[in-house]
Image (cartoon, coloured by chain):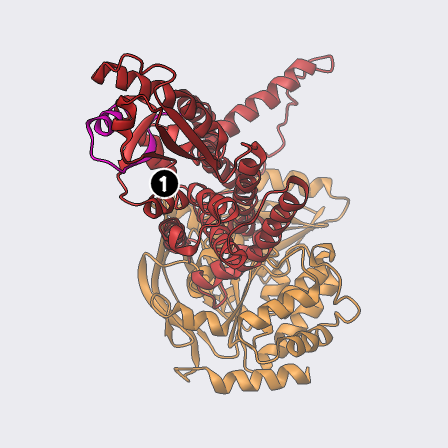
Chain colours: A orange, B red
């Protein structure tokens, strides 16, 4: 980590026009493709050194938002700054200080690990691209693989290389678009340890993900659906703000009873969500009183065991999504 | 969401369904073809362009060959021959030089393909029955073009003289035509083909190298990463073009070297001028290929555009068929193609020993085409994913 620390320090001194604590500050961003709004009226602020989780279903506008932040897309409406630079007019300056990891592996599959890193080092104008690439290879634990062709690396190694590539020019801000999709749990854990280490050094990280466990590893999260940012804050804040009442039901003799129960109570007034989790069933409702009324007759059954519980983050998100869907139809 | 799998399995036909499956692929292919606009246009345009070019533009017995007439005497016979030359479809008198040196320069620069010199006292000698001789110089770098016109010349002059002057015995014996097949006295076609091949091979390979360069990045997904980095379109373009200039240079050296060794094609002009102008030609084609790359949506489209561009280059540049034989509109199209200019340059330098001052028009035309292509490419290059 020592090489990275040094590089990070240099980066902080060099750039950082605003010098303030807010790294991303955008208001009312809207982006349309063929007249269809993919992102609408999105405002957000991200503080320096924060790991900011970006959650939402497929096609909700996460990638589009990230691309607007790094200058790959021009917003149709709205204004904002990234690292103190205007996201419409100063994209050249933003690009120098942002590391962007695309959703799909976008390094050169036919170049070796070392050649890819050296290429990036040269584009960002590092003084000694070869030395920087060597240091990155060591730091990423890619020693021994530096001459391997990038296209032949496994998913986990590709992702490590991609992270190494976007941190190589010591950026101020990392934008990671679903960096851990298709990566095994061990590699994911190592990846997150790395992200936390980088954030501890003052790097700001915006990361989009589908995984709930990853959301819980973020300092702050934002949930976006149908192009709108529905909720943001810490995980505890988001769960508390949902006002969701959840029961966990387990069956005394086998799961057949749970299956039947699921079919019976789905769609009853007050029951907003029914979802199986292994040998139990999560039953949730936005209004506690109507939910209690709907399930009262089942609670007395001897073959079922009802326990009131905190809603999981997933419960909260599924609920947000269906609420948003109701609003748009 | 909860009913992704249908509760009732759909009925399936028995047998292995050979035709049904073939049909399924066929329908899919048609839909994809319909979506791919460029392929669709190509299906119509390639046969149409070929047909029109071969049908209307290409003529193996060339007409209106640019001709210079040097009149050493002011006489009626001279004027009559001039008029007769203009009246045939073979020749078109485009210049009236006053000295032999001027005539030579016109031929060397390729401005005319024929020179007719009527010596002093031609008319008087003719009337006295002294069998005077007329000198005809043909640019034989393209033996096909010069050969058939030379054959026609004798007849044209005879008819003119008999018709206008009623010189009774202006038949076979009245005068003599001394013809010089200059630059390629033996009329060897390989002297014409080999320099032409240098240009054709370079056009084909250079176009395709760069035509694929941007679309490949888009198709492989690396473009998004590249655009997110602090690099400008001009930097990307030049970085992608330079390596292939070297490749093209090696190719050109190889073809010319083989031409000299195996086919005994001479290199009469300055090798350094040939090398510099070849480099310019290579860069021009690379720029055009790169422009296609910024317009095309995928590698297939870029390939198709290259072929579309290559076709008129082969047919209208003077590589396969004499440039002078084409109708004016086709010559104008030809002037827009880099290969036309390069062919003149490479043939002039290798076979005629032409110098830079003879070639500045063609060199400037190639440089102009390159700048136009680069400008289009840089403006067309999408800096964002919008």
Q: Where does residue B122 sit, x and y in percent of width and height? A: 28, 30
The extreme right residue here reads A144
| Figure quadrant of the C terminus of chain A | top left
**Where does the image place residue A135, in percent across and percent down from the top left?**
69, 78
Would you say residue A215 is visible in this rendering?
A: yes
Horizontal placement of A255 versus A125: left or right? right
Question: Percent position (x, y) of residue A266?
Answer: 55, 41
Tag 1 secondary structure: helix
Q: Quadrant of the N terminus of chain A?
A: bottom right
Q: Residues within 10 Å of mark 1 (few under 14, many from 20)?
A: some
Q: Count the marks: how many? A: 1
Left or right relative to A114: residue A232: left
Q: Please state the chain letter of the residue tagged with numbered disc 1 in the rendered image.
A: B
The answer to whether residue B288 is above or below residue A26 is: above
Q: Nearer the viewer, residue B368 or A63?
A: B368
Estimate the x, y position of residue B98 in percent, counting from the top left: 26, 44
The residue segment tinted magenta is B62-84
The residue sitting at 45% across, 25% down in the picture is B50
Quadrant of residue B55 in the image? top left
Q: Nearer the viewer, residue A17 or A226?
A: A17
**From where the camera sits, is residue A39 visible?**
no
Residue occupying the point 27% across, 15% down: B162
Q: Which residue is mark 1?
A: B335
The answer to whether residue B81 is magenta is yes
B56 with respect to B290 (left or right): left
Name the one closer to the observer, B246 or A103: B246
Q: Nearer the viewer, residue B239 or B197?
A: B197
């Amino acid at each position: 980590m020592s090489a990275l620390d040094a590089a990070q320090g240099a980066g902080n001194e060099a750039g950082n026009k605003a010098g303030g604590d807010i790294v991303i500050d955008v208001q009312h961003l809207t982006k349309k493709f063929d007249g269809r709004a993919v992102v609408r009226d999105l405002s957000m602020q991200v503080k320096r050194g924060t790991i900011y989780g970006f959650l939402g279903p497929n096609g909700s506008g996460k990638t589009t938002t990230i691309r607007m932040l790094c200058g790959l897309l021009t917003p149709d409406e709205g204004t904002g700054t990234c690292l103190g630079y205007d996201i419409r007019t100063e994209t050249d300056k933003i690009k120098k200080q942002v590391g962007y990891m695309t959703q799909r592996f976008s390094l050169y599959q036919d170049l070796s690990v070392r050649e890819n890193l050296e290429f990036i080092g040269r584009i960002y104008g590092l003084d000694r691209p070869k030395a920087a690439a060597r240091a990155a290879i060591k730091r990423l634990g890619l020693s021994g693989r530096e001459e391997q062709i990038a296209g032949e690396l496994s998913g986990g190694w590709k992702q490590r290389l991609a992270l190494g590539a976007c941190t190589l020019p010591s950026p101020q801000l990392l934008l990671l678009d679903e960096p851990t999709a298709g990566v095994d749990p061990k590699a994911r854990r190592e990846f997150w340890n790395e992200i936390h280490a980088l954030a501890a050094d003052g790097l700001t990280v915006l990361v989009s993900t589908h995984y709930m466990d990853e959301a819980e590893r973020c300092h702050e999260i934002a949930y976006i659906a149908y192009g709108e940012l529905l909720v943001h804050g810490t995980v505890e804040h988001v769960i508390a703000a949902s006002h969701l009442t959840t029961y966990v039901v387990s069956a005394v003799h086998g799961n057949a009873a749970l299956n039947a129960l699921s079919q019976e109570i789905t769609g009853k007034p007050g029951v907003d969500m029914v979802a199986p989790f292994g040998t139990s069933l999560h039953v949730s409702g936005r209004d506690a009183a109507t939910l209690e009324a709907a399930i009262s007759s089942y609670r007395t059954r001897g073959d079922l065991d009802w326990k009131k519980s905190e809603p999981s983050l997933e419960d909260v998100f599924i609920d947000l999504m269906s609420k948003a869907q109701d609003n748009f139809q | 969401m909860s009913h992704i799998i249908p509760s009732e399995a759909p009925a399936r036909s028995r047998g292995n369904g050979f035709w049904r499956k073939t049909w399924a692929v066929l329908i899919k292919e048609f839909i994809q073809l319909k979506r791919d606009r460029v392929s669709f246009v190509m299906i119509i345009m390639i046969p149409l362009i070929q047909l029109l070019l071969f049908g209307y533009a290409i003529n193996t017995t060339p007409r209106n060959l640019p001709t210079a007439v040097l009149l050493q005497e002011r006489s009626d016979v001279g004027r009559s021959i001039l008029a007769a030359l203009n009246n045939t479809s073979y020749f078109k008198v485009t210049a009236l030089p006053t000295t032999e040196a001027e005539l030579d320069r016109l031929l060397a620069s390729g401005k005319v393909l024929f020179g007719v010199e009527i010596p002093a006292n031609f008319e008087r000698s003719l009337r006295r029955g002294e069998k005077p001789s007329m000198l005809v110089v043909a640019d034989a770098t393209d033996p096909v073009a010069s050969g058939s016109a030379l054959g026609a010349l004798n007849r044209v002059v005879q008819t003119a003289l008999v018709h206008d002057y009623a010189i009774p015995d202006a038949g076979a014996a009245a005068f003599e035509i001394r013809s010089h097949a200059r630059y390629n006295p033996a009329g060897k076609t390989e002297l014409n083909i080999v320099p032409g091949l240098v240009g054709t091979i370079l056009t084909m390979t250079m176009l395709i190298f760069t035509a694929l360069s941007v679309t490949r990045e888009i198709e492989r997904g690396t473009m998004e990463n590249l655009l997110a980095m602090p690099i400008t379109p001009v930097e990307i373009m030049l970085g992608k073009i330079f390596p292939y200039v070297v490749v093209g240079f090696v190719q050109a050296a190889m073809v010319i070297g083989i031409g000299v060794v195996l086919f005994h094609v001479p290199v009469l002009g300055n090798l350094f001028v040939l090398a510099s102008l070849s480099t310019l030609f290579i860069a021009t084609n690379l720029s055009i290929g790169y422009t296609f790359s910024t317009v095309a949506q995928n590698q297939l489209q870029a390939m198709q555009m290259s072929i579309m561009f290559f076709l008129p280059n082969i047919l209208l540049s003077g590589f396969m068929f004499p440039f002078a034989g084409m109708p004016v509109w086709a010559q104008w199209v030809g002037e827009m193609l880099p290969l036309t200019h390069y062919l003149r340059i490479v043939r002039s330098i290798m076979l005629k020993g032409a110098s830079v001052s003879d070639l500045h028009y063609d060199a400037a035309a190639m440089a102009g085409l390159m700048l136009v292509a680069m400008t289009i490419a840089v403006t067309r290059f999408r800096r964002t994913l919008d």
